Amino acid sequence: MIFEKHIGIIGGMSAIGLLIVEHILPLLSGNKVLIAGRRPINRSELIEAYEDKLEYFQMDYRNEPLLDLYCSQCSLIINAAGPSYKIGDRIAIQALKNDCHYIDIGGYDALFHLMRKHEKEMIEKKLCFIIGAGWMPGISGVFSKYIFKKHVNDLEDIRLRVYFGAVDEWSYNSTYDLTVSSMKSVKPSIYSYGKEISVKQSEYIHQKLFNLIGRKKICLPLFDGQLIEIAKSLNQVKEVSTFVMVNDFISMLTFMYLNAFKKNKPEEATLILQKDYRRLVKKEKCWGSVICKISGLKEQKYIEKYFYLYTNNNLLFTALTPVVVCNKILKNQTKIGLNYPCNSIDCDLFMEELNSYGIKHSQYEKNN
């Protein structure tokens, strides 16, 4: 499919934005990419090999008339700007008003809930609005659903777990979103046969050695919106639980301090968290991983199966998700309306496309 208008990438001159632009351009035949950013640029800053396919639009998303003008020139918009918690639904609303498909690499559950009341309009206009189209959330949900659907019938009395975490020198915007999300009060829970069950956090917090990472991590129970939807669909599974990896006890104490003393000062808290991640990068280098554990009985033997994605390039994993999603929209292979990537696109097709970029999962099995 060739859109009548441009493909817009807001924040397209950022580190993550440039990666999206670089990987999306080879997929386009008749469309140009309209990059939006706050600062003026020289044409020499654009990717030389594709200069004829690129246009630049100087804009601050807080300027509503300019944002409206920008969206009116696009058929599909990828939002790679941030922080998501400051942008809210500003860009998504203008995209909907101007009949644009919309992909947000962040947005998180907050934007998903804000846009729910507009889903009828999206469906009437046959638009795809895909939220959390990054690495975590994004690939983390697609990969988990892909693994669980393939292996959920391998064992009896089955239990499923997802572990996810990453270390990197995150940008201020990314760290701000992480800071704000970590300060929200969360009710610890698991899912059993598709139903939510509240649990005591103290009973599920644990420390686990991850051989691939080569370190022990403190694992805290945490469901995000995409993983909740997956857990609800697994009504034949005895237990589904998901955990975020907290990197070490210093990080744990940092998060506790921020929650206790900086809850109403997110800017200050962001700078403290950025400093902690710089410490972690020196200690561990950059990495990111999603690990799916499936455990249960087979012929009366207890078996654990581990499936994992691992990278030292978190930015690339984040950038490839909106690229894959955009390509699927161009091919009419996405569900219309408001969705997370794991519910919008066939997970087999998604993983197949990631595979074409050299992203493959590994696995191992333990028998007791």
Image: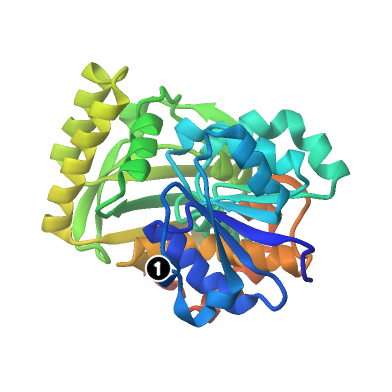
Q: Amino acid at mark 1?
A: Glu
Using a 10 Å C-alpha cutoff, classify the residue at mark 1 as few (fewer than 14 neighbours), some (14 to 19) or many (20 or more): few
Where does residue 344 sit, x and y in percent of width and height? 70, 54
Q: Position of residue 160 (x, y in %)?
A: 50, 51
Front residue of this view, candidates 147 and 116: 116
Residue 195 visible from this viewpoint: no
Residue 201 against residue 326 in the figure, above or below: above
Above-or-below relation of 71 to 205: below
On the image, which quarter does residue 229 sit in? top right
Residue at mark 1: 45
Q: Quadrant of residue 286?
A: bottom left
Residue 38 screen position, x and y as percent: 44, 46
Q: Residue at x 64, y 35 (%)?
A: 65
Indicate the quadrant where residue 228 lies: top right
Color encoding of the figure: rainbow
At which x and y percent is residue 232?
64, 40
Q: In the visual, does 283 lie left or right of 126?
A: left
Left or right? Give the position of 2 relative to 178.
right
Residue shown at the point (35%, 26%) measured from the top left: 183
